[in-house]
Amino acid sequence: MKRPSVFLAYTDYELKSYYSDAGLAALKQSANVVMNQSGRVLEGKELAQAAAGCEIILAHRSTPGLASTFENAPDLVAFLRAAVDISTVDVEAASAQGILVTRASAGFGTAVAEMALAMIFDVARGISKARTAFAAGQEPVLPKGLQVSSSSLGIVGFGVIGRQLAKLGSGLGMRVRVADPHADPEALGEMASSFDEVLAESDFVVCLAASRPETRNMFDRAAFERMKPGSSFFNLSRGELVDEDALEAALDSGRLRGAGLDVGRAPDQKPSPRFIGRPDVVVMPHVGGMTPQAREHQTMDTVRQVAAMAAGKVPPQTVNLAQAHRLTRLGIQAGELAATGAQA
């Protein structure tokens, strides 16, 4: 079988922070690895030029998969995203060129759920507010702290993270309610609630919904006005689910006690600058899934995908397998593509 060449699009910082040494060593066992030497996030035609001669581009979430990359990469067979989110990958453009797109599976449920709980404890007890005041030489004047174990937790979205957060919240003794029209009612059980019920009855509302056209700006001015006065809002899903003007207004008015944001509308889905420095907002730079266990899970997903292609096999976690005719260049037979195409 042909030994493929992989262009690892990660910057030095991203490589150190997100792709493990063990994963890189394992990747090199199956493929020739070409590093991104630019020191920058590459995209478009520039990415295609840097990856010239490589059959595979392995991309961190910061690297988009644009039509201009796929149209200018005659050697490219597959574009691997080392994350679940492929919203910045033009799958239609890749398919038009016969290029496979893959994604990683979700291995960060526990990590992000724990981050949500950390933010909840911070806002409930005013930890960031107190630290900000002390750092400014002031004596903090804080509202009475909330006891998390006797509070209500509302979760919007019952995916991998939502299920784990519900489990952790219930274990603490919190009253957990979940809104997700796509979830199995039996799995939700007594936690099942409508979106309006979650907003009106929860001390802490956590946005974990999937990003779809219908969920864009689902947390708008009307939604924040329906939230319980003195409650708090947390977003660990996607920035586009929240109308940031409406969130800022709800915080400024005092209707919300506070907020926690691991995502936002800044580049790479990081929280927007307007919320950085606010003592009533706990801000993290899109690192909810950054634990060694979660990082290694997604790293090794990409290793397994490359190893499969190097062995002439269809990799796991494909997105557009039925259109990826360039896979035959790696010795993956048309018969196998047809047999597994239904899983694409």
Image (spheres, rainbow, N blue to C red):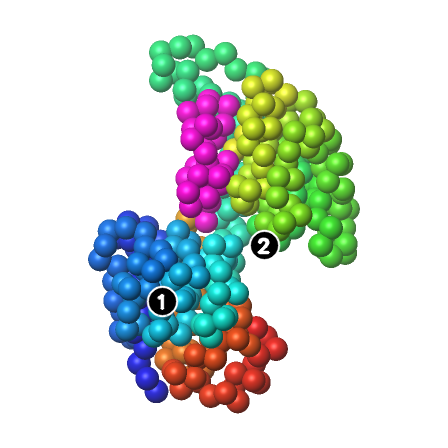
Q: Do callouts 2 and 1 mark residues in contact (Cβ within 8 Å)?
A: no
Magenta-colored span: 261-289
Towards the viewer: 20 or 277 = 277
Which residue is found at the position 23% from the left and 54% from the top?
Answer: 38
Q: Can I make out residue 172 in this image?
A: no
Q: Of callouts 2 and 1, which one flags the residue occurring earlier in the amino acid sequence?
A: 1
Q: Can I make out residue 105 in this image?
A: yes
Residue 172 left/right relative to 73: right
Towards the viewer: 172 or 325 = 325
Residue 22, image x, y percentages: 31, 64
Residue 224, image x, y percentages: 66, 29
Q: CA distance from mark 2 to mark 1?
A: 36 Å
Which residue is found at the position 40% from the left and 67% from the top?
Answer: 71
Check disc 2 and report the residue beneath it: 160
Towards the viewer: 262 or 187 = 262
> Which amino acid does the dot numbered 1 rest on?
Asn
> Which amino acid does the dot numbered 2 rest on?
Val
Which residue is found at the position 60% from the left and 24% from the top?
Answer: 250
Check disc 1 and report the residue beneath it: 72
Which image quadrant for residue 266? top left
- Is residue 34 found inside the magenta-colored segment of the image? no
- Farthest residue toward the left? 37
Residue 224 left/right relative to 51: right
| Neighbour tally class for label 2: few under 14, some 14-19, many 20 plus, Cα within 10 Å | some
The secondary structure type at the circle numbered 1 is loop
